[in-house]
Amino acid sequence: MTAPQLEIQAIAALVAAACALPGVFLVLRRMALISDAISHALLPGIVLAFFLVEDLTSPLLVVGAASTGLVTVLLVELLKRTELVREDAAIGLVFPVLFSIGVILITRFAGDVHLDVDAVLLGELAFAPFDRFVVAGYDVGPSALWLMSGILALNVTFIVLLYKELKLATFDAALATALGLSPALVHYGLMALVSVTAVGAFDAVGSILVVALMIAPPAAAYLLTDRLPVMLGLATLLGVGSALGGYWLAHWLDASIAGSMAGAAGIAFALAFLLAPERGLVSLARRRLRQRWEFAQGALAIHLMQHEGSPEAAEESRIEHLNRHLRWDPDFAARVVRGAQRRGLVARVDGSLALTDRGRAVARELVVR
Amino acid sequence: MSETPAIEVSDLTVAYGATPVLWDVDLTVPPGVLMAIVGPNGAGKTTLIKAILGLIRPAAGRVLVQGRPYDVQRRLVAYVPQRRTVDWDFPTSVLDVVTMGRYGALGWIRRPGRRDRRLALEALEQVGMTELAHRQISQLSGGQQQRVFLARALVQDASVYLMDEPFAGVDATTERAIVHLLRRLRETGRTVVVVHHDLQTVEEYFDWATLLNVRRIASGPVDEVFTEQNLRLTYGGRVAFLAEGRSAVVP
C-alpha cells in the first residue's frame, strides 16, 4: 500500500465513523430524511463560505456552511408548524430550494475555482491526499484527515457528554421537557452535529453519499442489537468496514470510491436485513415456520384431549381420520403427527393416537391460555 | 385551607388554533389526596396534565405547584405519560428506562451512577418487576410497560404525581398492583392526580375527583362531587350506568 492509499482509507474510515454516530440518533428519531435535506441544503452555504475563505477544508467554511443545515431544520419546522404541510412535504419543499440556489451560484460564479457540482455531489476522495495541511513548514498530512479527525472528536465528545439527554429526548421527549432537560436544545445540538459532519464529509464522499453513511450502518446496527451503546459501536464498525471495503471494491472495479463505499454500506445493511439473528428476514421466516408446526401440534393435542375417554375417542384418534376431522390434508397430518411424536406429545397405539402425559400438559396449558 | 395546595390552577385556557380545549379552568388540589380526573373523550384531561407540566403553553391562566410556578418546582413533580406515547422498540432495557426518572435530579451532563441504579431497582421491586430489570423493553406486555412507567415515576421521589391513564389496557393483576401503589403514595403524604376512564371504579379507588369537559364541572371529595347530576353535566346525559345503588342515567 502506498502512502496516499493509506491516507485515503484513513479519511474514509474517519468520515464513516463521524457519520454513523449522529446517524444512530437520526434513525432512532425517525429523522433519516433530514440528513438528506441537510446534506443537500448545505450547498449554498458551502459555496458562499468558499467565496469568503477560498479553502474547502477551512474550519471557517465548515461552520459557515453548517449554519445552512440549521437554517434548513428551522425552515422545515416553521413550515410544519403552519399545519398546512406535513413534515415530509416540508422537507421536500425546503431542501431543493436551497440546493438549487447553490447550484446556480456555482454555475454562475464559480466557474474558475476548484468547486463544481460533480465534486459537491459525489466528492473526490482520490484527490484528498493532494491537499496537505502544513504547519510551520512541516507537512503533517492531508487537510481532510485533520478536519475529519476534528469532526469525529466533536461528535464523540457531544455524544459522550449528552448521551443521557440524547437518549431521553429520543425515547420520551415529553418527560425530557418535564424534567427540564430541553429536548429542543438537544435536537438542535444534534442537527448542528449532523450539519458539521455533512460539510466535513461532503468533500470526501459528496453530499449524496453522506446520507448512505449516516443511515445504512445505524439502520443495520438497529437490526443487530437491542442495546443503544452496542448500536453506537456496531454502527461505527459497520460504517468503517463499509468505507474500507468500499475503497478496495473501487480499487478492484476501477470505479468511484464514494460510490463503492455507499454500495458497501448498502450491502452491509442488506446482509443484516436478511441474516440478523432475531429480526432478520431469514430468522423471522424460520420462526414463523416453527410456530406453524408447533401450533398444529398443539391443535392435535387439544383435539385428542377433547375426545379422551369419550365413546367416540377411538374413532377421533385414528390417524387416517385426522384429515376428515381436522380438515388437514394427509401429508400435512402425517408430518404433524411425526413432529408431535418427536416432541413426545402423542404415542401411536395400533393405528390410533394417544396423548402422553406431556401432551396432555401442553394441551391443557394451551387451552387455559 | 391553611395548607398550600399541591396544585393550584387558575383561569387556565388552552386552545389548539381557535378550538378551545380547556376554558377558564380553576382547580385546587389539596395535598395528600388521590384524585381522579374524569370526563369524556376530548374533554381536555390530558391537556390539563400537560399544561400543569408546562408541556403546553396555555392561552391564559396560571399554574402553581405547592405555591410556586412549575419551572422552579419540577423536582417535586413526577409524570407518567400514556404508555402509547413512546416507541417501545427503542433499544434499551427496563432498568435503563426506570433510571430515566433520575435524570431530572442529575441535571445536564452528569451520568447516572450506582446509587441511581440502586434506586431504580428498588422502584422496580415496588412494582413487582425485579426479575425483568434487564429485559429489552419491546418484550414487555402492556401491563408490564405501565409498571415500568410507574417505577420510573417512583424513582423521581416526587411529592406530586401526575398520571395519564395508567389503567388503560392493563390486566387485572396490574390494575390491582397500581391501585395498591397509588394508596401507598397517598399514605406517605404524596398527592396523586390520575386521568381515569372507568367511572365504575372512581369511588372505590379515589377520594377526590374532578369532572372535566372543556370547563371544570366539579371538583372536590368523591362523595360530594361524583353525583348523578354532575356526571350528566359532564357527559351530556350519555351516562348509561352508575355505581350500584343508584339509578342509571338514561338520556
Image: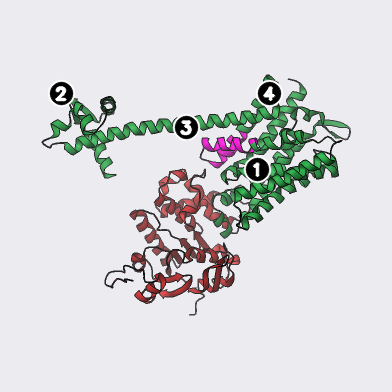
Chain colours: A green, B red
The CA distance from mark 4 to mark 1 is 25 Å
Are the residues under badges 4 and 2 in a single subunit?
Answer: yes
Type of amino acid under label 2: Asp
Q: Is residue A38 magenta?
A: no
Residue located 17% across and 24% down the image:
A351
Specify the segment rendered in magenta.
A212-237
| Residue position for label 2 | A350
Which comes sooner in the sequence, label 4 or label 3?
4
* Label placed on residue A35: 1
Q: Is residue A61 left or right of residue A96?
A: right
In the rendered image, is residue A130 in sight?
yes
Type of amino acid under label 1: Ser
The CA distance from mark 4 to mark 2 is 68 Å
Above or below: residue B196 compared with residue A286: below
Q: Nearer the viewer, mark 4 or mark 2?
A: 4
* Label placed on residue A324: none
Type of amino acid under label 4: Ala
Residue B136 image point, x, y percent: 47, 43
Residue A44 image point, x, y percent: 77, 44
* Label placed on residue A281: 3
| Residue position for label 4 | A250
Which comes sooner in the sequence, label 4 or label 2?
4
Are the residues under badges 4 and 1 in a single subunit?
Answer: yes
The main secondary structure of the magenta stretch is helix
Q: Are marks 3 and 2 in contact (CB under 8 Å)?
A: no
Residue A66 image point, x, y percent: 74, 46
